[in-house]
Amino acid sequence: MNILVTGAAGYIGSVCSEVLLKRGHQVIALDNLQEGHRSAVPPAATFIQGDLADRPQIEKVFSAHKIDAVMHFAGEALVAKSVREPSTFYAANVACGVNLLDAMVRHGVDKFIFSSTAATYGEPDTVPIPEDHRKAPINPYGKSKLRFEEILADYRAYTGLKYVTVRYFNAAGASADRGENHRMETHLIPRVLDTALGNLPEMEIFGFDYPTPDGTCVRDFIHVLDISDSHVLALEQIERVPGEAFNVGTTSGYSNLQVVQAAERITGRKVPHRLSPRRPGDPAILVASNEKLKRLLGWEPKHSSLEEIIQSAWDWRKRYPHGYPD
Ligand code: UDP
């Protein structure tokens, strides 16, 4: 298939592009390079620098290329930023997504895989969290993604769009060539590794009074290659599961302090850290049920032990201690 990948220069979009190419698909890689890196885009992809806010430009992309399906990774994804700048999130995650859907409808493209998030659930009543759990997001990031999920259901009803929503828990890890490198890094594992490398003198662990075994937040870390597989499986079987949402996670949670300890063991280095106040917008525990993804799509996590996640991220980080060259 010819697949338009939005956000293809970003962390998950670039790794998923790599996986799609390996499976024999063609990738048209769209990114505005605001957060992404040109050198993260696999060389075999056709790269277009463009912004989903620009409707005429999207129209040109769909006119110039025969597109069979869209994987939509582009968007804003940092919880803390969403609390400070909600409008940026509604513009990027809702309005830009609608621009993309409208171009798809005009051009008769009806297959769509959407990157959503565990943040759509908010504070869970039960863990592991099943897909039909109540949705009560506690930050504008989760709210913006949930709004777009609802919009997708309307497009399905009124235009026949076939879509699958994939709700990631905590994406982490790296392929041999592509890893996590945000311009302003706020994610736990990259910051832990930056501290192990000495790029940061010390890191903060946000919150030590959560109702969890050691008082720090608990997260379900899922390897970016396993996330990519879930996208490929969803696309290849979309005729069977249109309109469905799938969690992608492992069902195992680790606390922030457990991640620091695992990283110290794997890297053989100290990770100086101090306990700080909670970060606004963070739920205490997010752990996925992945029963639906396994049952309906035949997905299995292959790379998501905490060990392999941290080891692969560490290997990539040592290769690119200051991130991508651009
Ligand atoms: N976190 C932390 N220190 C950091 C970065 C993150 O304690 O320097 C915590 C954060 O407060 C949350 C967990 O790590 O409890 C995961 O945060 P991250 O930003 O990696 O992912 P999120 O869960 O927000 O998607």
Image (spheres, rainbow, N blue to C red):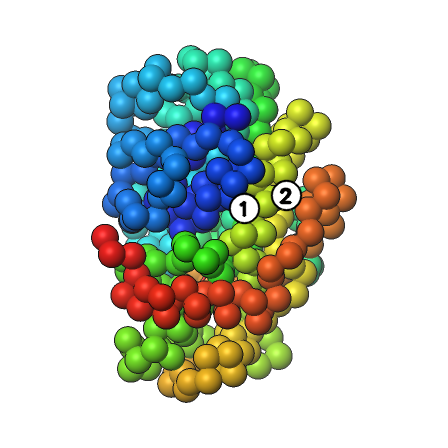
Q: Is residue 146 visible?
A: no
**Separation of disc 2 and disc 1 at Cα?**
13 Å
**Ligand 1 has an atom within 8 Å of the beta carbon of the residue at disc 1:** no
Q: Which residue is mark 2?
A: 246
Left or right: residue 156 versus residue 312 is: right
Residue 316: x and y in percent read: 41, 64
Residue occupying image coordinates x 36% and y 52%: 82
- Circle 1 is placed at which residue position? 228
Instruction: Kindly state the secondary structure of the residue where label 1 is placed.
Output: helix
Q: Nearer the viewer, residue 175 or 157?
A: 175
Q: Which kind of residue does numbered mark 2 sit on? A: Phe
Numbered mark located on residue 74 in the image = none
Q: Which mark's residue is nearer the viewer, 2 or 1?
A: 1
- Observer-nearest residue: 34 or 123? 34
Is there CB contact under 8 Å for labels 2 and 1? no
Give above or below for 190 relative to 6.
Answer: below
